[in-house]
Image: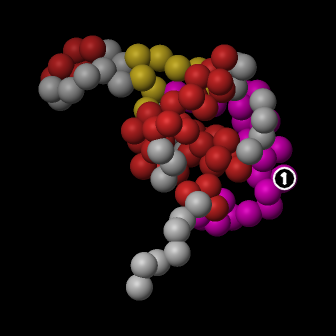
């Protein structure tokens, strides 16, 4: 796995508990075109596990079922390596991952 800053940011968000894709996008500020392919790679490498929620719960809330992701032990080890590599507070890492544009004032 290529340990990039966005990968570290997603792993950090997952370390805070099980999350689904849109929740990860909100937590990290990363777009779906970054988050979903990354989740597939992380799952394929055994760094995260995924599972669908109970469809009855989704029906009760009148929405499609969510797929929740959680870190594995290997994912936690990769997160530790990422945090050591970038040596940034999570807030700073998130800002860099967003590649924010200068204000238009």
Residue 64 in which image quadrant? top left
Is 60 above or below relative to 6? above
- 59 or 45, which lies in front? 45
- 62 or 97, which lies in front? 97
- Judge whether residue 94 is colored magenta: yes
Residue 19 visible within the image: no
**Left or right placement of residue 67 versus residue 74 in this view:** left
Is 96 above or below relative to 37? below
- 80 or 28, which lies in front? 28
Determine the residue positioned at 74% across, 63% down.
88
Determine the residue positioned at 43% across, 32% down.
20
| Residue at the extreme front | 104
Residue 16 in which image quadrant? top right
**Left or right placement of residue 61 versus residue 35 in this view:** left
Is 38 above or below relative to 96? above
Could you classify mark 1 by the number of other residues whose Cα lies within 10 Å: few (under 14), some (14-19), or many (20 or more)? few
| Whole-percent x, y for residue 83 in the image | 77, 52
Screen quadrant of the N terminus: top right
| Whole-percent x, y for residue 54 in the image | 32, 15
Task: Give the labeled residue for mark 1.
Answer: 85
**Left or right placement of residue 45 versus residue 35 in this view:** right
User: How many numbered circles does the render carry?
Assistant: 1
Prevailing secondary structure of the magenta residues? helix
SS label for mark 1: helix
Residue 95 visible within the image: yes
Determine the residue positioned at 40% across, 38% down.
22
| Whole-percent x, y for residue 14 in the image | 57, 39
Screen quadrant of the C terminus: bottom left
Determine the residue positioned at 64% across, 66% down.
92
Residues rendered magenta in the picture: 69-95
């Amino acid at each position: 796995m290529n340990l990039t800053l966005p990968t570290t940011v997603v792993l950090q968000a997952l370390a805070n508990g099980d999350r689904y894709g849109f929740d990860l996008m909100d937590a990290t500020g990363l777009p779906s075109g970054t988050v979903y392919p990354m989740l597939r790679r992380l799952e394929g490498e055994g760094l995260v596990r995924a599972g669908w929620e109970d469809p009855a719960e989704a029906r009760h809330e009148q929405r499609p079922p969510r797929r929740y992701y959680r870190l594995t032990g290997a994912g936690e080890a990769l997160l530790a390596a990422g945090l050591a590599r970038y040596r940034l507070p999570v807030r700073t890492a998130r800002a860099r991952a967003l590649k924010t544009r200068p204000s238009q004032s």
